[in-house]
Each structure stands twice: as structure tokens, then as C-alpha cells.
Amino acid sequence: MSERMSLLEFLKERSGIRLSKLEAYLDLVDKASVQYIPKDLCKQEFSLSNGQFVITITELAGCWHWHRATVRTFIEQLEKMNQISVTRLTKSQIITIPMLAAFLQEFIPLHQD
């Protein structure tokens, strides 16, 4: 329980018009739920599993109105907290949200026809 509380405490900070950490995390979850791949990377072939998506630090910085260094630090902190795992590629990253992946693994097979 204290691990979840520390995650919420870390995420709740808000600064000006920039997305808060919570909003940024929810954006990551949203992207993972649809296995997002940026338009400029669509020509590359990615094999994504549940709870994964492809992104660049530059795109996240633009979406969230953050500096790229801030995005990198945020991603690294979430990784240290075991909330995400990151596979670093040459010009992009595959981010996995294990909690979402586990949920989708359990939920989706029950509702397929």
C-alpha cells in the first residue's frame, strides 16, 4: 500500500500549464492501452504486446509541455519505481506498463467471442 501511496504522491505535483505528473502518467497508460505508435515511426515494424507502446522523448515533451530532460527523468523515476519498463531503441523507446499488461492479459481473453 505504501508503494502505491508513494506513486500517487510523486504524480500529484502540478506546475502551470504543463501537464502534472499524474496527467503525464495517465497519458502513458492511455497510449499503452491502444499500443500507440507515432505517425513518423509507423513505417517501422514493431511487435507490441498488451500494455506496450512506442514513443520518443521529443514527442512526450511536446505533448506534456515539458523539457526533454524532465521527460527522461520522469521516465527513469517511474522505471525505478517498477511502474514501467523501457526498451531503448535507436530513436525511440518501447514502454511497457506491467500493471496494464497484466490487467489486459486477464481481462481480454474473458471477453473475446
Image (spheres, rainbow, N blue to C red):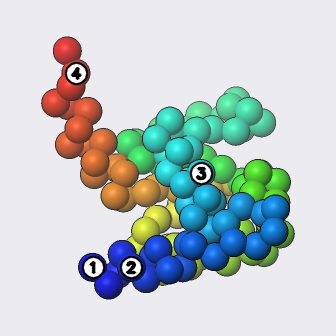
What is the total number of numbered labels drawn onto the structure image?
Answer: 4
Measuring 53% from the left and 45% from the top, which residue is drawn there? 30
Q: Quadrant of residue 93?
A: bottom right
Place of residue 96 in the rendered image (x, y in percent of width and height, measured from the top left): 46, 56
Q: Which residue is mark 4?
A: 112
Amino acid beneath label 4:
Gln
Query: Disc 2, disc 1: CB below 8 Å?
Result: yes
Question: Which label lies toward us, 2 or 3?
Answer: 2
Left or right of 91 in this view: 3 = left
Q: CA distance from mark 2 to mark 1?
A: 6 Å
Question: Which label lies toward us, 4 or 2?
Answer: 2
Query: Disc 4, disc 3: CB below 8 Å?
Result: no
Measuring 63% from the left and 38% from the top, which residue is drawn there? 37
Place of residue 32 in the rendered image (x, y in percent of width and height, measured from the top left): 50, 46
Q: CA distance from mark 4 to mark 3?
A: 26 Å
Amino acid beneath label 1:
Met
